[in-house]
Amino acid sequence: MDDQFLHRLRREPPAEFASRLKWQLDRPAPTRRYRSRLILGLAICAAAFALASPPGRRVWQDWFANTTSPANTAPPEKSLPVSSPVRPVQVPGPPGVAARAGQPRYNAAAAPIAAQQPVPEPAAVQVLPAPSDAPPIATQVIAPAIVAGVPQTAEMQAAVAVSVRQGLFLNLSFVNLPLNMMLQRRLPLDAGVLRTSATRLQTLSSLIPEVFSKDTRAFAVNTRALESIWTTFPQFVSKADDLTLAADELAAAAAADDEVAALRAIGRIEAACNACHDVYRMK
């Protein structure tokens, strides 16, 4: 392929195409007003943003309220006569006591009227009866606040003891939850979680005998604790100690990064909890 081959393929364009091309090239270019349209669009956007913003809406609402509110046609207040200042009344004191210079004595008769009015007594508190479908007191958790210096009744002390016990076991459930999930292979073993859980279990399990030292069998309290806790209290303490020993085993396994020993300790913790619940907790 050379230039002669391309020259032979060349064809002259029609006359109409040449004349139209010349007309388009000679036509003056139209003036474009993109700049003015851009400025107008930016101004409209800025105005819309100003009206939509919180300060803009506040100004618009204030202006609308001032333009639509009726004119204030109330008559001007009458000027009140200015009363002359009241001079303090000098009341003679007991003999032998001189008044301080420049300081008037207090006169009950010249005191303001508002200060002499008696203070109204507070209205009596109306106690409404409980609804008929309210649960009995025995099914409600009663935990009165402990106020320093205020003597507590035996019922109040029993309710507080039950509340403390329930709070302790809620914390135990919170600590045991990730351990049970690791034992079921629903979570991977985490050395940091194992160490933290072992330390918390060591502390919480050692508190179980102490929080059950208060015998609440004689009171109507909401609890799942059976009476056998206090009738066989040494055996109950022994089962609580089993949980503490299992927590110690978990702490040692976590410190040694022994996953097999950690899983064995978690299983022992679960077994200790179930063994105590089967005997001392209401189903």
Image (cartoon, rainbow, N blue to C red):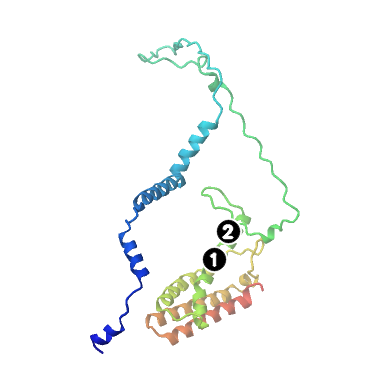
The single residue placed furthest to the front in the displayed view is: 15
Residue 54: x %, y % from top left: 45, 45
Residue at image position (55%, 19%) is 113
Q: Is the residue 186 above or below the residue 41 in the image?
A: below
Where's residue 36, x and y in %? 36, 49
- The reply, left or right, for residue 30 in relation to residue 145 is left
Label 1 vs label 2: CA separation? 10 Å
Tag 2 residue: 160
Work out whether mark 1 precedes mark 2 in sequence or the reverse, and give the earlier one: 2
Q: Up-down: is 117 above or below 267?
A: above
Expressed as whole percent of the image width and height from the top left, the position of residue 93 reads: 44, 13
Q: Amino acid at mark 2?
A: Val
Residue drawn at (51%, 31%) of the image: 67
Q: Residues within 10 Å of mark 2 (few under 14, many from 20)?
A: many
Q: Position of residue 247 (x, y in %)?
A: 47, 77
Quadrant location of residue 70? top right
Is disc 2 placed on a helix, strand or loop? Answer: helix
Residue 116, quarter of the rendered image:
top right
The outermost residue toward the right is 132
- Please tell me whether mark 1 sits on a helix, a strand or a loop: helix
Which residue is depicted at the point 31% across and 62% down? 25
The quadrant the N terminus occupies is bottom left
Neighbourhood count class around disc 1 (C-alpha, 10 Å): few under 14, some 14–19, many 20 upward = some
Residue 44 visible here: yes
Q: Are marks 1 and 2 in contact (CB under 8 Å)?
A: no
- Type of amino acid at the residue the image marks with label 1: Val
Q: Residue at x 48, y 15 (%)?
A: 107
Q: Report which quarter residue 143 is drawn in.
A: bottom right
Label placed on residue 211: 1
